[in-house]
Image: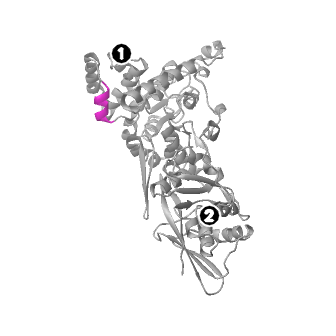
Amino acid sequence: MKTPKTYSSIPKGFGAELVTVEGCLARGLSSFQIVGLASRTIDESRERIRAAINNSRLYFPKDKLTINLAPASLQKSGNYLDLAIAVNILALTGQLLTNDIANSMFVGELALDGHIRPVRGIINVAECAEKHGFKQLFLPSANAEQVRFLRLKNLHITPINSLSELVLTLKGVVQPSLDQSYTKSSVVKNTHTDNAYGFLDQIIGQEQAKRALTIALAGHHNLLLYGPPGSGKSMLASCAPMLLPPPSRQEAIEATKIHSPAKDLTSVLTERPFQAPHHSASRAALIGDGNLPGEISLAHTGVLYLDELPEFRRDLLEALRQPLENHTITIARAKQRVSFPASFMLIATMNPCPCGYYGDDRHECKCNPTQRVNYLHRLSGPLLDRIDMTIRMPRVDSSVLVKNTTISTHEHASAKRQIAAAAKRQLARQGKQNGTLSSYETTLHCPRTPEANQILEDAARRLGLSARSYFKLIKVARTIADLAKSDRIEAAHVLEALQFRDIGPNLE
């Protein structure tokens, strides 16, 4: 009794798992059963597959049909296996030959009329197919652009619109679609629109805060903005996406791999993500649930913006410590362990107290000392130690607001050019941005003048800096030097970096 095998794949974490589909026909009452630790989603696919085969004018067997999904120890879910199961049934009934489906992988969701719908996480699937030596990948036409962006050398991509078209292609009656070169029309921006973001010129005053944002974006440094309500913290943070340089090709692939399983995304992301979860977000939404990535992974290669930082639950904030340090997040569950990249830049905002007016010269603070202390203690020392830069944004005087009538984007454009030039300089020197350097790499790539070393030594002793804070101070100074096009860190660069480490009494 023949048991043909077809192959598909299911995304798991940042990769994908190979699934072998085996079919068996036996005498008995007409039935269709899928075994192999399949979820309810896959179990329900039986009716989709049956209808798709019949509506494509193909034969569906009336005997006892059993489909096995191997390995049986792997939990399988999603709509990825519909096409592979249908092809296996066609091979089992002699409508396709073994040679027709050799060295091929099939992925896609079947509609009742036989059309093939797109699936999420197709880049993970394509990489799995190439890794296991398959020569051809049949996939939904809507998913083709994402895979073509990979430019895989050893895997031929064949987009398919329907089950009947697939059969004719495998039989050689219809020529498969040729691979097309990647064009800019096949890319999309992130989920926000440009109108959702701000420009530096729209922020009145706050010159030091603008400078801090420019330095942070140029060097991939974590930034904390604090001050009274209405001082421009949120507006300044919203400028970040429009200032960031475009991602590299590899970064675009990584971002798309993460976003595709979590969203109905069929094109390629070519703008850096900007994730802004609400403080009521759950733990699974922020760090992921083991199957889908969370906000910190969706922010990979981009920005994670946390507005009103102390309002987030303490356990959620502490969960940021590992990815801020290692740039990855590992989620361990009883039956699986998955890892997602999480190399994001953190921008956070907060008020100095619950009412927001502590230290403000125009409004009296209504909080007692205990309330202020409890509010600030929501942020642990280890978490603050992982923030490279902190800047206080005071209230903007009303007279400045009245006098400002200028409408331009010159300041924003200038900052964007500086950030792009500094980032390019860092990548040419060390292959990564300053904020992601290890302590060893910081020593290797951050030469300093004797005067700068003396200031660093005095600051470390006076401020009681930890080893992590000491190296972060050097990395911020290195970014300031890059913005100034200097090969070495000079005393002026360290002095400016110290302005963003002296966080003041409100956050001690």
Q: Position of residue 349 (x, y in %)?
A: 51, 33
Dividing the picture into quarters, in which one does residue 428 lie?
Answer: top left
Number of dots carrying numbers: 2
Q: Position of residue 137 (x, y in %)?
A: 56, 56
The residue labelled by disc 2 is 83
| SS majority, magenta | helix
Q: Quadrant of the N terminus?
A: bottom right
In the picture provided, is 47 more to the left or to the right than 410? right
Q: Which residues are magenta?
A: 438-446
Q: Quadrant of the C terminus?
A: top left
State the residue in front, 49 or 76.
49
Q: Decide: few, some or many residues near mark 1? Use Cα within 10 Å; few <14, some 14-19, many ≥20.
A: some
Kindly tell me whether residue 312 is visible in this rendering: no
Q: Position of residue 444 (x, y in %)?
A: 28, 29
Say if mark 1 contacts mark 2, CB within 8 Å: no
Q: Position of residue 200 (x, y in %)?
A: 57, 22
Does 7 sit above or below residue 192? below
Which amino acid lies under the numbered mark 2 shown in the image of this protein? Leu
In the picture provided, is 30 more to the left or to the right than 335? right
State the residue in front, 379 or 134.
134
Q: SS class of the residue under badge 1?
A: helix
Q: Which residue is the extreme one toward the front?
A: 172
- Residue 159 in the magenta stretch? The answer is no
- Residue 70: mark in rendering: none
Q: Which residue is the extreme one toward the bottom?
A: 28
Dividing the picture into quarters, in which one does residue 270 lie?
Answer: top right
In the picture provided, is 56 more to the left or to the right than 415? right
Does 374 sit above or below residue 473? below
Which amino acid lies under the numbered mark 1 shown in the image of this protein? Ala
Q: Decide: few, some or many residues near mark 2? Use Cα within 10 Å; few <14, some 14-19, many ≥20.
A: many
- Residue 492: mark in rendering: 1
